[in-house]
């Protein structure tokens, strides 16, 4: 898999939550902070986003708003409208009325609890991708397909929607990184720097290998010092620190999604002994691998 797909697969847990939300003006709705990443897609009408300590900003039809850390916020039909609702499970999806109609798809992706990834950590609290002619056509197509399946369920919808939500997440991130590809720092820069991308690729492909910075430099076709400097500037940490991070993220995914014995998990991610693996894992995740496996499949309820 490519770096972006593999990274998202490693930090995703559970199934995404989603729903079609329809209100008629005036309306105001609070979205408390959630564990994971949230999103809104405006299908019809418009609304305003209110965030703590910042100026309100507008969302129009076709706009996508992504919250990589599930930040709390309010949606209102117009600034000044009072907040009368809080997003909770089981609430009405549509409330009719005489005012202007706004329809949104609201959703949330569940992410690993204890350990995040710098790819998402570096994003702003709110990623706004406006709908503009010719801009991000793949994202627009995914939005249209998702809206259609939610509005008119048919045979296979229960399988189609989770796949479309996974696709939507990747297109959101792809669109963001494409818009910032000319930056010299951050993951947008990492994806476009051939040397850094090559080093990331082999780390992701073979985390069990005892990589050294000279080896990674040779793979990338640059000197050890050059790789270390460019890798740290874009990824946000030195190559071997990222190697440890990726090993433990991969281990957490194996613990969640497979019944591989702990010793086997340790070997798959480059630890020669189960003891060394358990010590490293507990230091980062706050629990032993076995305990993490037992508690990893107890998802939270996410209101959208």
Image (cartoon, rainbow, N blue to C red):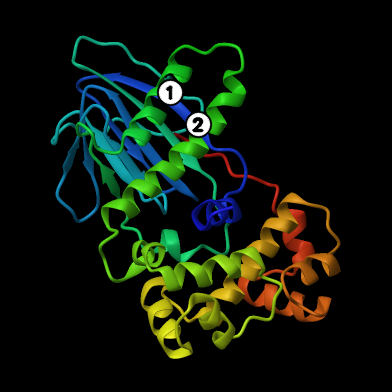
Mark closer to the chain start, 2 or 1: 1
Left or right side of 273 for 252 = left
Is 112 placed above or below 99 here?
Answer: below
Q: Which mark is residue 2?
A: none
Q: Quadrant of residue 39?
A: top left
Q: Is residue 181 above or below residue 184?
A: above
Instruction: Give the residue number, with chain letter if any, for mark 1.
Output: 145
Q: Write down the quadrant of residue 226 in the picture.
A: bottom left
Looking at the picture, tell me which residue is in the foreground, 249 or 234.
Answer: 234
- The single residue placed furthest to the bottom in the displayed view is 225
Q: Position of residue 159 (x, y in %)?
A: 61, 25
Q: Residues within 10 Å of mark 2 (few under 14, many from 20)?
A: some
User: Could you tell me which secondary element the residue under label 2 belongs to?
Assistant: helix
Residue at the spot of label 2:
164
Q: Write the residue at 48% across / 79% down.
A: 221
Real-space Cα distance between discs 2 and 1? 8 Å
Disc 2 + disc 1, Cβ < 8 Å: yes
Q: Position of residue 44 (x, y in %)?
A: 26, 21
Quarter of the image with the C terminus is top left
Give the residue drawn at x 50%, y 43%.
Answer: 109
Secondary structure at numbered mark 1: helix
Whole-percent x, y for residue 129 in the image: 27, 42
Who is closer to the viewer here, 279 or 177?
A: 177
Instruction: Indicate left or right for 178 with 55 as reference.
Output: right
Residue at figure coordinates x 68%, y 61% from the top left: 252
In the rendered image, the vertical position of residue 191 relative to residue 169, given as above or below: below
């Amino acid at each position: 898999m490519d770096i972006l797909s593999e990274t998202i697969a490693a930090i995703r847990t559970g199934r995404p939550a989603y729903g079609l939300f329809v209100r008629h003006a005036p309306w105001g709705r609070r979205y408390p902070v959630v564990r994971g990443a949230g999103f809104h897609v405006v299908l019809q009408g418009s609304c305003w986003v209110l965030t703590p300590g910042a100026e309100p900003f507008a969302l129009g039809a076709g706009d996508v708003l992504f919250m990589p850390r599930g930040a709390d916020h309010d949606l209102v039909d117009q600034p000044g409208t009072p907040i009368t609702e809080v997003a909770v499970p089981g609430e009405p999806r549509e409330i009719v009325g005489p005012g202007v109609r706004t329809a949104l798809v609201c959703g949330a992706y569940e992410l690993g609890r204890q350990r995040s990834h710098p790819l998402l950590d570096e994003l702003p609290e709110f990623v706004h991708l406006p709908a503009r002619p010719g801009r991000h056509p793949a994202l627009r197509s995914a939005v249209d397909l998702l809206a259609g399946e939610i509005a008119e369920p048919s045979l296979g919808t229960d399988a189609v929607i989770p796949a479309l939500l996974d696709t939507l997440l990747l297109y959101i991130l792809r669109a963001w990184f494409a818009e910032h590809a000319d930056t010299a720092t951050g993951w947008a820069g990492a994806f476009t720097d051939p040397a850094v991308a090559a080093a990331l690729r082999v780390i992701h492909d073979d985390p069990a290998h005892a990589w050294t910075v000279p080896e990674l430099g040779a793979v990338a076709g640059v000197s050890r010092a050059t790789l270390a400097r460019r890798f740290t500037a874009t990824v946000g940490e030195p190559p071997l620190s990222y190697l440890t991070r990726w090993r433990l993220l991969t281990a957490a995914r194996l613990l969640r999604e497979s019944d591989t014995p702990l010793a086997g998990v340790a070997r798959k991610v480059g630890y020669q002994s189960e003891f060394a693996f358990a010590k490293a894992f507990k230091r980062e995740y706050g629990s032993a691998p076995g305990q993490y496996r037992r508690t990893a499949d107890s998802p939270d309820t996410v209101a959208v």
